[in-house]
Image (tube, helix red, strand yellow):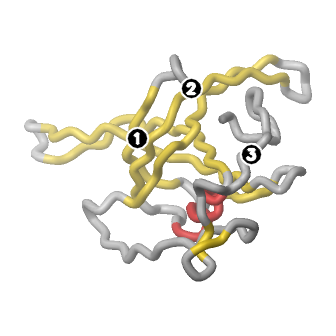
């Protein structure tokens, strides 16, 4: 979406991604990434961690299922997405505003880890080619609309 700030975060997953499905069957995964500034203190000769920033993230459709199956608490990740501000009322009637990340890309950070990548199977059984592989270019477009933090994806 034009106009929303793009952000790249390198941080640690604070918990396993939480996957659920909307009423219309669309997968969504939510997770929090903690990121902090680390600086070398010349006086003490030690590395010191600054205050952590916690960003709540969401990712939709097949990507949500891939994230839920692949990533876990404590893993270091690289997230690219757009910042989105959302307001809501609590059960007590208080107005709250939060800033969240609509994730476009995510993957493990490989600074202190290695991974084995496996290509995911496409889930659309309606359009196949090449021995059963789905063709993403001929798959029907999603008709879901979104507004704020609804039951549908924001794109």
Please tell me whether mark 3 sits on a helix, a strand or a loop.
Answer: loop
Residue 70 location in percent, x, y? Answer: 53, 69
Q: Which residue is mark 3?
A: 142
- Quarter of the picture containing the C terminus is top right
- Mark 1 or 2 closer to N-term? 2
Can you tell which of label 3 and label 1 is closer to the viewer? 3
Label 3: few (<14), some (14–19) or many (≥20) C-alpha neighbours in 10 Å: few
* Residue 97, picture quadrant: top right
Residue ranking furthest to the bottom: 131
Q: Are marks 3 and 2 in contact (CB under 8 Å)?
A: no
Residue 117 in the image, given as x and y percentages of width and height: 40, 73
Q: Quadrant of residue 37?
A: top left
Give the position of the N terminus as an image quadrant.
top right
Q: Which residue is mark 1?
A: 9
* Mark nearer the viewer, 1 or 2: 2
Read off the residue under disc 2: 1
Instruction: Say which residue appears at 69% left-offset and 66% top-offset.
Output: 127
Q: Are marks 3 and 1 in contact (CB under 8 Å)?
A: no
**Residue 43 location, x and y as percent?**
9, 37
Q: Secondary structure at mark 2?
A: loop
Instruction: Characterize the local packing of mark 2: few (<14), some (14-19) or many (20 or more) Cα atoms within 10 angstroms.
Output: few
Q: Nearer the viewer, residue 116 or 57?
A: 116
Q: Nearer the viewer, mark 3 or mark 2?
A: 3
Q: CA distance from mark 3 to mark 2?
A: 17 Å
Question: Which of the two residues, 111 or 1, is positioned nearer the viewer here?
Answer: 1
> Distance from label 1 to label 2 (Cα)?
19 Å
Q: Alpha-carbon neighbours of circle 1 within 10 Å: few (<14), some, or many (≥20)? A: some
């Amino acid at each position: 979406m034009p106009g929303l700030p793009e952000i790249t975060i390198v941080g640690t997953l604070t918990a396993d991604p939480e996957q659920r499905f909307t009423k219309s069957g669309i997968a969504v995964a939510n997770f929090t990434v903690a990121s902090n500034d680390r600086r070398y203190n010349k006086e003490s000769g030690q590395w010191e961690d600054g205050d952590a920033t916690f960003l709540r993230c969401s990712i939709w459709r097949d990507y949500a299922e891939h994230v839920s199956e692949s990533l876990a608490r404590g893993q270091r990740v690289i997230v690219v997405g757009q910042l989105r501000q959302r307001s809501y009322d609590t059960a007590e009637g208080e107005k709250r505003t939060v800033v969240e990340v609509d994730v476009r890309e995510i993957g493990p950070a490989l600074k202190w880890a290695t991974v084995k990548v496996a290509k995911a199977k496409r889930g659309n059984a309606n359009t196949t080619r090449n021995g059963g592989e789905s063709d993403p270019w001929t798959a029907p477009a999603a008709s879901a609309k979104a507004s704020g933090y609804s039951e549908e994806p924001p794109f």
